[in-house]
Amino acid sequence: MKTNRLKFILALSLVLNISFLAAAGYTYYKNSGDWLSPFGFKMKKGEYLFEKLALKPGQFDAMRARAIPFRKEIDEKRKAMLEKRKELFGLMRADNPDKKAIDARISEINEMQANLQRAIVAHILDEKAILDKDQGKKFLDLIENAMADGKKAECLATAN
């Protein structure tokens, strides 16, 4: 009888472990296809906001060709800002925080944020320039709505 209980507990444990691993694997698989858009919300990798426009094939190819290096550039800038923020928290954690160093780090972060904003706005204007008037309006409407939908409408700031 003890052997039967032990077998039952072992089988139950095995089933729970397998279900946990399956759930973790599924979650990882579903989330690994996401990237952070320039506007701070998650999108599927390979998906672009401008795909929601009625683009001509040449327009789509041109926008996609520019979007890939743009995402890489924005990712690098975001990572650099993240490092500066970590440094800022390191300064704030000190027993006697150096307020001048903290202010300097804040100024660096602000400058990086401003440069990031400029790069994003320049990219949006470049993309808008290859669209006709109606497409340009829809493009800006898509961006504005994406930012206003509560999808982390933080700073205009992309990932892998």
Image (cartoon, rainbow, N blue to C red):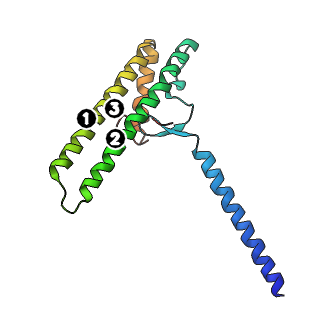
Marks 3 & 2, CB-CB < 8 Å contact: yes
Image quarter where the N terminus lies is bottom right
Secondary structure of residue under mark 2: helix
Does residue 153 show up? no
Q: Which residue was labeled with disc 1?
A: 111
Question: Label 3 is placed on what type of residue?
Answer: Leu
Name the side, left or right, on which 123 lies relative to 16: left
Question: Label 1 is placed on what type of residue?
Answer: Glu
Find the residue positioned furthest to the left: 100
**Front residue of 139 and 109:** 109
Where is residue 46 drawn, in percent x and y?
A: 57, 31
Q: Which residue was labeled with disc 3?
A: 116
Task: For marks 3 and 2, give the CA distance.
Answer: 10 Å
Name the side, left or right, on which 49 lies relative to 155: right
The circle on residue 81 is 2
Residue 108 occupies which quadrant of the picture? top left
Question: Label 2 is placed on what type of residue?
Answer: Met
Residue 8 occupies which quadrant of the picture? bottom right
Task: For marks 3 and 1, give the CA distance.
Answer: 9 Å
Where is residue 66 drawn, in percent x and y?
A: 48, 21
The circle on residue 12 is none
Secondary structure of residue under mark 3: helix
Secondary structure of residue under mark 1: helix
State which tag comes first along the sequence, 3 or 2. 2
> Within 10 angstroms of label 3, few (less than 14), some, or many (20 or more) residues?
many
